[in-house]
Image (tube, rainbow, N blue to C red):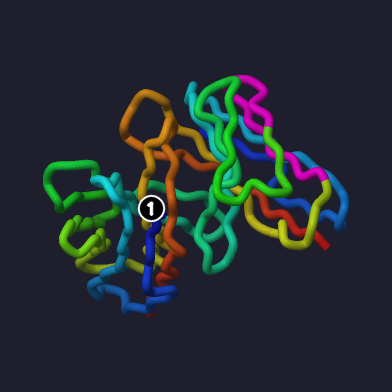
Amino acid sequence: AQSVTQPDIHITVSEGASLELRCNYSYGATPYLFWYVQSPGQGLQLLLKYFSGDTLVQGIKGFEAEFKRSQSSFNLRKPSVHWSDAAEYFCAVALIQGAQKLVFGQGTRLTINP
Amino acid sequence: NAGVTQTPKFQVLKTGQSMTLQCAQDMNHNSMYWYRQDPGMGLRLIYYSASEGTTDKGEVPNGYNVSRLNKREFSLRLESAAPSQTSVYFCASTPLGTDTGELFFGEGSRLTVL
């Protein structure tokens, strides 16, 4: 069955430090991959997506992610985090079976130390 | 720009009571979804509607029913609420016929079942 794993439940980094959030997927075909961010009390907002082509994709708010087929990974990175990046981050894979359905990872909560 | 609107935002029920969560989108999207979010489990798909007039079960449909009232509205009903249904519920929509896969989310409805 298709699945998404985010190994880190909670990560704490200092403001200005670099960030990498891990995501591994299990999917038979070429996946459509996404990263969403959820601020406290809010819905989910799309950060970036990968469908095909260049394996390094740029998103909003200075985030980027790299698709590595050999490692079944789609890790999210940011060179320098800001206090406003504190949120929960979800990786997801899209299944196209008559309708587009997203399967989400468990989420990684990011805390920023001043 | 309302996007996806959910009502109510908060609700407390007693075990056995029924209620309906309402969702409406003003983006002319064809597909709509209901997810639930529980700590450590990410978002899990309850039901979805690929287009007006169709509905299908997702990963965790037991205890729920849905109605796609028209293209704009997709409601989720709990006929006899149970404490296990305490969760945050998110409605989402996406255009059909595109391969963006991006889901647009509402702000969520927090339900507590006592």
Q: Chain of mark 1?
A: A
Residue located 24% across and 64% down the image = A78
Q: Position of residue A38 (x, y in %)?
A: 46, 56
Location of the N terminus of chain A by quadrant is bottom left
Q: Residue A61 or B75: which is nearer the viewer?
A: B75
Residue B112 appears in the picture as rendered? yes
Q: Position of residue B3 (x, y in %)?
A: 51, 33
Q: Is residue B91 above or below residue B1?
A: below
Q: Is residue B68 magenta?
A: yes
Location of the C terminus of chain A by quadrant is bottom left
Q: Which residues are magenta?
A: B67-79
Q: Position of residue A106 (x, y in %)?
A: 46, 64
- What's under tag 1, amino acid-wise? Ala
**In the image: residue A79, left or right of residue B3:** left
Label 1: element kind: strand
Residue A48 appears in the picture as rendered? no
Q: Residue most toward the left?
A: A54
